[in-house]
Image (tube, coloured by chain):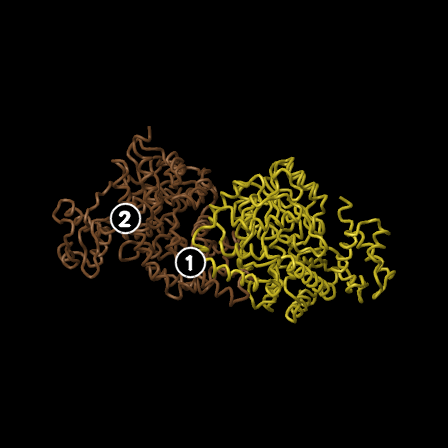
Chain colours: A yellow, B brown
């Protein structure tokens, strides 16, 4: 397990040299080959380490010339404290969500709340042109229900991509859904009965908490490390206890902490799921948004016995409003397919066809490359702003992918819900920490979305937040 | 209540005259005015009576000349026996559905199974052209989640139509969904907890039974009259018992019996719901498909206190594969809106926009007029075929709208599931009766869909079914 974050220790080593002044601003960072030799690691590891240093603002890449120490090397805030586990499951009540979502979705607020990519980053114009062409030329589209388990050419394209991410999966194993949230919903329903307990990350995405409420399930929070995600030992205890019927995990760039589970942990989690016969439902919606050179593998890539129920969508990378996702439910395929029929009969045809053709055309990989670069820049920008202007003692997550940052205020910080209220009054949306726990913990934390490109409005929003957080304002 | 089917007794009176030979084939049926005077009823009642006689094959309308006795007045089969109520609720297990649905959806079978309109009857080409125009001209469509409670211009168009059907509803009260099934799903979830009992029609649509299974609910079957639907007295007992937390009813052209609840029953059901504070969830997906001159009112039209949760969609009349429906949840609006977010976040944008524009253009009413006429012809055709060729003693429903027929075989008929197997072996799909009850009753019944226009394949399918049903075949 120690070696799984090798690139991080390489990055830390170089960051340390920068902090100590061994390397000064403008200096060339040791070449990839030299670092390979010095540290005895692979080229991929060094490349990943440099990407991480770049994302953290320590170095800058110059075209065809290598990496250089950034002109003002970033001060690095402490990591937030991650989430404590709970010893007892809890029933889910969570009524403030719709109001919160409405506030997040208000197009007139500064968009630091909702976990959505900026529409200007998405190729929806091209996608819509494809949809238009299909709608014009195929007169009968939509005249019948798309037959289960979903539009075959789309399932083939998804299979191709999931295989490229390391999984052994065919189109037959995929069921298309109305976004990843429906995939999670059906997966949960397939393997639990009301009253059952489900293990979740602490903190976790409020969409998962809402789903547990909808299905009458109890939540058991599992402790999470702020960089590597769920604690393997605690997960093992939960799976052994037999009280936990399933877990929902986001191994790649979790929401809100942005954690990335090391491969060794992933392998271990998959083994535990099989040996205790407890399904693990994974959401991989951020998996394609790595800042490093390689796409991290989903849990499904290590799954040989079908206990991993893989869920994902195109909502974070391509077209949220198309509402197209998928489920790879492993040994629970039949149950999920049946539930898909019961819940929404079918996924709309036209949107599936358009995405299938877009993927087939090859444009998606090019788009993803650009999107990852832009998102890394956005995360770096917000990280700098928080580091420079938020009160001393603020802690901040250091995601290696995705576009979410988790802020922990110093002790006696502003209550997150109150902060949300004050921020909204100034036209800024954020996601208060209490939403990310069924016990409404994390009261002095909040999530910032870096999905939108830097703009004067975003800069103003971050400055205003800094003021709202300053001790003078908290009274 | 007796007067609520006045037009039926007028129709029965004239049918009786035809049967007794008072009126012979080719005779002109008494004019509307004369019948009005003779029977002391309104013009609307007579018009409805003549439409019913036409649908049943007794009379033919000739343009600008009135109604004439059909050349070979139809023999009328006895009605099926409707459904008996149950005294005890039952947990729902129903595992054969996906296989059944797959068989129904097989495009190579004769389509007498699935409850879908023939694609050649739907204006999807025009709808897709609208979708294409929108996708081409509005580059950003789909780049963000459609905000709750759904696309406003579509909600305005739906409100306009629902108001025309007699309801007092504004666009603000409507939530768009992924088909009516999601609306039913969210409505059920909003007002029940797992383990609760829900009153359903006997027999009822298997989609409703599946939803109860998905939500961990118990089903209490309410007895149904084969023409007027759920028995008011039995419903009252169920609501009084307090054990029933909600009911799901299809007041207009139910699935599978095709019943039409008289207005007096509707008024009564709505009053009972309010006085016992038990929500009634109504599906009105067939309401626009009346063979009579007027569209029957939904329960919602009688609702003053918000206990009716209205659900419908465009899947039976416009575009099944677009997956657009809606919910008007009355006093449970907030809960349903919250659940919509938890279940699928949002309904896709492009499909909502296209339907909104199609409705706004006014084409929908013209389309519905043609669709109703063609469907009435299809129902009449299948009715004739069953009447002429199925074994003596067969009973058949007489719907006044929708496109479903319910066949009850004489005692010792073929088991419906076995019949489905044999029919499928001959390339014909039907829906076996057992699917329409959580206790798998109605073993010798089955449902025929008349959604597709008459064709040689349909004629062959009906002939083959007749052979499969003949006593010689059943061994």
Residue B469 located left or right of residue A200: left
> Between A437 and A414, which is closer to the camera in this rendering?
A437
Q: Name above or below for residue A114 compared with residue A310.
A: below
Residue toward you, A146 or A407: A146
Disc ID at residue B428: none
Q: Chain of mark 1?
A: B
Task: Out of A468 and A63, give the one closest to the viewer.
Answer: A63
Residue A300, image x, y percentages? 64, 44
Q: Is residue A67 left or right of residue A165?
A: right
**Which chain does the numbered disc 2 sit on?**
B
Q: Secondary structure at mark 1?
A: helix
Q: Examine the rendering and report whether any part of residue A446 can be seen.
A: no
* Residue drawn 30% across the image and 57% down it: B295
Image-based side of A75 in relation to A148, left or right: right
Q: Residue furthest front?
A: B456
Q: Which residue is mark 1?
A: B124
Q: Residues within 10 Å of mark 2 (few under 14, many from 20)?
A: many
Residue behind mark 2:
B380
Image coordinates of residue B425 in percent, x first then y, are 41, 36
Quadrant location, the C terminus of chain B: top left
Query: Pointer 1: residues within 10 angstroms few (<14), some, or many (20+)?
Result: many
**x and y percent of residue B56 in the render?**
24, 48
CA gap, disc 1 and disc 2 = 25 Å
Whole-percent x, y for residue B181 in the image: 44, 50
Q: Mark 1 or mark 2: name the one nearer the start of the chain.
A: 1
The kind of secondary structure element at disc 2 is: helix
Residue placed furthest toward the left: B22
In terms of image quadrants, where is residue A447?
bottom right
Farthest-out residue, bottom:
A456
**Would you place residue B255 above or below residue A366 in this image?**
above
Between residues B353 and A57, which one lies in front from this camera angle?
B353
């Amino acid at each position: 397990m120690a070696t799984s974050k090798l690139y991080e220790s390489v990055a830390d080593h170089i960051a340390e040299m920068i902090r100590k002044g061994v390397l000064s601003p403008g200096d060339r960072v040791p070449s990839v080959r030299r670092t390979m030799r010095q540290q005895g690691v692979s080229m991929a590891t060094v490349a990943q380490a440099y990407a991480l240093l770049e994302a953290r603002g320590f170095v800058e890449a110059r075209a065809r010339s290598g990496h250089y120490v950034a002109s003002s090397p970033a001060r690095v805030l402490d990591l937030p404290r991650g989430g404590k586990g709970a010893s007892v499951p809890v029933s889910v009540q969570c009524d403030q969500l719709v109001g919160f979502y409405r506030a997040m979705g208000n197009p007139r607020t500064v968009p630091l709340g909702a976990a959505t990519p900026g529409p200007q980053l998405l190729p929806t114009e091209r996608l819509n042109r494809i949809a238009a062409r299909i709608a014009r030329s195929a007169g009968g589209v939509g005249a019948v229900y798309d037959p289960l388990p979903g539009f075959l050419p789309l399932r083939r394209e998804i299979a191709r991509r999931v295989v490229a991410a390391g999984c052994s999966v065919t189109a037959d194993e995929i069921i298309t859904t109305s976004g990843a949230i429906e995939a999670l919903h059906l997966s949960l329903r397939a393997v639990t009965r009301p009253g059952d307990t489900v293990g979740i990350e602490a903190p976790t995405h409020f969409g998962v908490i809402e789903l547990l409420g909808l299905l009458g399930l109890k939540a058991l929070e599992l402790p999470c490390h702020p960089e590597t995600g769920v604690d393997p030992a605690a997960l093992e205890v939960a799976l052994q206890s037999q009280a936990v019927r399933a877990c929902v995990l986001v191994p790649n760039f979790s929401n809100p902490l942005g954690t990335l589970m090391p491969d060794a942990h992933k392998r271990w989690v998959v083994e535990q799921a099989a040996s205790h016969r407890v399904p693990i439902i994974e959401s991989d919606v951020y998996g394609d948004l790595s800042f490093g050179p390689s796409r991290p593998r989903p849990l499904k890539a290590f799954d040989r016995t079908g206990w991993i129920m893989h869920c994902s969508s195109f909502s974070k990378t391509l077209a949220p409003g198309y509402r197209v996702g998928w489920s790879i439910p492993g040994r629970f395929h039949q149950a999920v397919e049946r539930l898909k029929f019961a819940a929404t009969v079918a996924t709309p045809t036209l949107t599936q066809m358009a995405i299938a053709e877009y993927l087939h055309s090859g444009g998606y990989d090019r788009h993803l490359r650009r999107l990852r670069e832009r998102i890394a820049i956005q995360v770096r920008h917000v990280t700098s702003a928080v580091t420079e202007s938020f009160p001393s003692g603020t802690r901040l997550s250091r995601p290696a992918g995705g576009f979410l940052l988790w802020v922990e205020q110093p002790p006696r910080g502003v209550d997150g819900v109150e902060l949300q209220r004050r921020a909204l009054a100034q036209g800024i949306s954020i996601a208060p920490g209490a939403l990310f726990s069924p016990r409404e913990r994390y009261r002095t934390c909040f999530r910032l979305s870096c999905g939108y490109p830097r703009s004067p409005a975003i800069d103003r929003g971050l400055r205003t937040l800094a003021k709202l957080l300053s001790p003078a304002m908290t009274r």
